Amino acid sequence: MNTVEVLAGINETLEDFIETLAAFDDDEFNEIPYEGSWTPGQVGQHVILSVSAFTALLAGPDTETERLPDLHVANLKAAFLNFDIKMQSPDFIIPPAIDYDKQEQLDTLDRLLERLNEIIPDADMSRTCTGMELPMMGHLTRTEVAHFIVYHSTRHIHQLKRILSHINLH
C-alpha cells in the first residue's frame, strides 16, 4: 500500500469517526449508555490520546527497517477488527471519567487529521519509528503506525455506533 492509499485510509477513517462522534446530542455525550461502557466523550478522548501519541510517533525519530515494513499490518487488522473480543487499553490512553466538550474534541480531531496530512506525504513509510514500542510487537514502521490508526479508530467507530443504537432504542 503506497503513501497516497495510506493517507486516504486515515482521512476516510478519521472523518467517519468525527462524523459518528458528532452524531451524539450534547446531553448524551457524557452519559454512560450501559454498564461496562465508556461515555461517547470518553471514547472520543481515548481516540484523541491514541491518535496524538501515534501522530507524534510518525513525526519522531526513526531508523532503517530490517524486516518487511508491513509485517504487523495483518495482525493489527485481525486484532482491532475482531469486535467479539474486549481489549484492555494501556493506562496512558485510558480516558478519565469526566465531562468532555464535544466541540472541543471535534476540533482536536480535525487538528490531528490536519497534522497527519502534513506528516505522511513527506515521510518514508518504510522506516521504523523508535519513539515507542508496542507490547508483543516492538517498534512499528510508519506503515504499521498508519494502519494502527485506521484499525484502532475503526474499532471505536464500531463502538460509537453500538452506543448510538443503544441510545436510540431507549
Image (cartoon, rainbow, N blue to C red):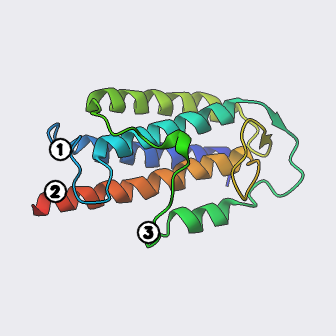
In this rendered view, identify the residue nearer to me: 99 or 58.
99
Mark 2 vs 3, N-terminal side: 3
Image vertical order of residue 60 relative to residue 24, above or below = above
Mark 1 vs 3, N-terminal side: 1
Q: CA distance from mark 2 to mark 3?
A: 19 Å
Q: What residue sits right under mark 1 in the picture? A: 28
Picture residue at 65% right of the left edge, 46% below the top = 145
Q: Are marks 1 and 3 in contact (CB under 8 Å)?
A: no
Instruction: Looking at this view, name the residue that lies furthest to the left.
Output: 170
Question: Which amino acid type corresponds to the residue marked 3 in the rendered image?
Answer: Phe
Using residue 44 as the reference point, say whether residue 65 is left or right of it. right
Image vertical order of residue 158 relative to residue 106, above or below = below
Q: Is residue 121 visible?
A: no
Q: How many marks?
A: 3
Q: What residue sits right under mark 3 in the picture? A: 83
Give the quadrant of residue 101. top left
Q: Is residue 167 visible?
A: yes
In this rendered view, identify the residue nearer to me: 2 or 63.
63
Q: What residue sits right under mark 2 in the picture? A: 167
Picture residue at 42% right of the left edge, 33% below the top = 109
